Amino acid sequence: MQAYAQAIGPALDALQERHGLQWQVLDGFLYPGHSVRRMHATPEKTGVGLMGRLANAVTAADIPLITEATVRELWVNAQQRVIGVGYERPDGTLEHLACDALILACNGFGGNPAMVRELLPEMRDALFAGHTGNDGSAIRAGWTSTPSAACSGSTASHCPICWPQAAPRGACLATRSGAISPATACSAPWPVATSPRTRLPI
């Protein structure tokens, strides 16, 4: 958590200076437990606006971006280093891509009730109103490729939800710190089978 806190400021600055993203600090509310306004947003103040600006920045930087691709496999060499991924297209086609490095990045496992019960039993009855894509697939991928990898730290609850007229309130379960997900694609060509490699299904 400390690493994230120390890196987020420079990351936002870099996105603005290098890629033209414009940030503004939201001053209409404080997150629970915060004493300082820290919530940054693009002028649209929506997730769609943020994603659109990030996509435009990626295009402008000539970075290949693969969408509609769900990672299903990791491929590792004899030293257990990840050398590629297999991803599924909407029509069920499985394609492959090689990589020198793989970043697993996600939003946790709150959308997977079984994993919540297993890893966060104290939050098993918490309301989840996030994206169903937060299914823990990246954590499983991390465990598959590096059995010692684990999700540790404190629980983060997020996005308060209010019902009208004296109905109960709740918060959607986010994740424990350190969660990972198969989302980052690599641009190297898929290698020919000149060296031993192993398929690790996710």
Image (tube, grey):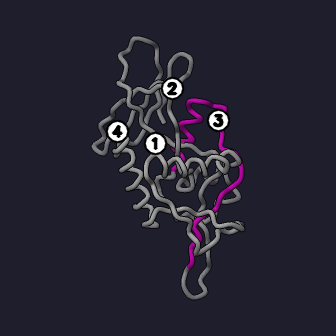
Q: Considering only order in the chain, which callout, 1 or 3, is on the residue closer to the N terminus? A: 3
Q: Are marks 2 and 4 in contact (CB under 8 Å)?
A: no
Q: Which residues are magenta?
A: 135-162
Secondary structure at numbered mark 3: loop
Q: CA distance from mark 3 to mark 4?
A: 33 Å
The image quarter containing residue 140 is top right
* Residue 67 falls left or right of residue 83: left
Question: CA–CA distance between discs 3 and 2?
Answer: 14 Å
Q: Nearer the viewer, mark 3 or mark 4?
A: 4
Which of the marked residues, 2 or 4, is nearer the chain's N terminus? Answer: 4
Frontmost residue, 189 versus 89: 189
Q: Which residue is mark 4?
A: 62
Q: Is residue 118 above or below residue 102?
A: below
Q: Which residue is mark 3?
A: 149
* SS for callout 4: loop
User: How many numbered marks have been drawn onto this rendered protein structure?
Assistant: 4
Q: Which residue is mark 2?
A: 82
Amino acid residing under circle 3: Ala
> Mark 1: which secondary structure?
loop
Q: Which residue is mark 1?
A: 183
